[in-house]
Amino acid sequence: MNKYFFIGLIFCAAITQCAAQENSFIHVKRQGLYEKDRDVDSLAVNGFKQVQIFDEDMGSEVWVSPETNCVTMNKEKSTVFKGQNSLHVKWDKVTGGCKWIGVGFGWNEWAAKDMTGLIDNVAVQLKVRSVNGSFSNFPVAFAFEDYTGVQSYCGFNTKQASGLFTDKSWTTVTIPLKDFNFISNGAEMSKIKQFVIQLEGDGDVYIDDIRIVNN
């Protein structure tokens, strides 16, 4: 046998030993390339994947009217329905003397959302909790705006709420999309821009987990 044969044997033995040691300490979790996409698909509503309007972040997709004398909005960490953050919205439109105030959500990085075919059996849903005390009338109106500038509104009524608004628990507010009168308003359902909550009177609430759901 020549020296090259012995060098080859030593090299193979070294590789085998390293592999054995590596297998003893390292466990590799196999993850499919499209696992994330499958998770998104599982949450889709009637094929619509951009269901989460607000969950955690208060970044460039979330805005509030600039009139701080009438409304403020802050990230809340101590009182949440889901995850680590909710929104604390406090407003007084009359005392502050504002003509219009609201908060908005241009979810999915402000991309146009195609909500065609969702009107009949889909709703927008959010969780609301009073900061102090309780109330039954939530003085707001909800709206979707498309990228042509058309805004379709729906005012709050008590039938949309799962119960009284209190500072002890979260109340679910569900608004069927058919109540927004998209068709009569001439809305472009393939180019939805944002979801808006128009604020009236005064209020002090936490808001969390705004999403599109099956109605």
Image: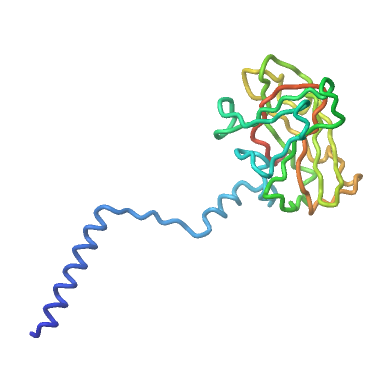
Residue occupying the far bottom of the picture: 2
The image shows residue 171, relative to residue 32, as above or below, that is above
Q: Position of residue 76 (x, y in %)?
A: 60, 29
140 sits to left or right of 5: right
| Quadrant position of the N terminus in the picture | bottom left
**Residue 66: image location, x then y, percent:** 76, 34
Q: In the rendered view, how is the structure colored?
A: rainbow
Question: What is the x, y in percent for residue 211?
Answer: 68, 39
Percent position of residue 67, x then y: 78, 31
For image coordinates 71% across by 19% down, the residue present is 164
Tally the numbered discs. 0
Residue 171 as seen in the image, left or right of residue 138:
left
Q: Nearer the viewer, residue 77 or 123?
A: 77
**Residue lying at 72% horizontally and 39% vertically, measured from the top left:** 63
Quadrant position of residue 154: top right
Q: Quadrant of residue 162?
A: top right
Q: Residue at x 79, y 54 (%)?
A: 190
From the viewer's perspective, is residue 69 above or below residue 56? above
Considering only vertical position in the picture, is 27 above or below 208? below
The residue lying at 30 percent from left, 54 percent from top is 26
View extreme (top): residue: 133
Q: Residue furthest right?
A: 184
In the rendered image, the quadrant that contains the C terminus is top right
Please state which of residues 66 and 100 is positioned toward the viewer in this rendering.
66
- Is 36 on the left-hand or right-hand side of 118? left
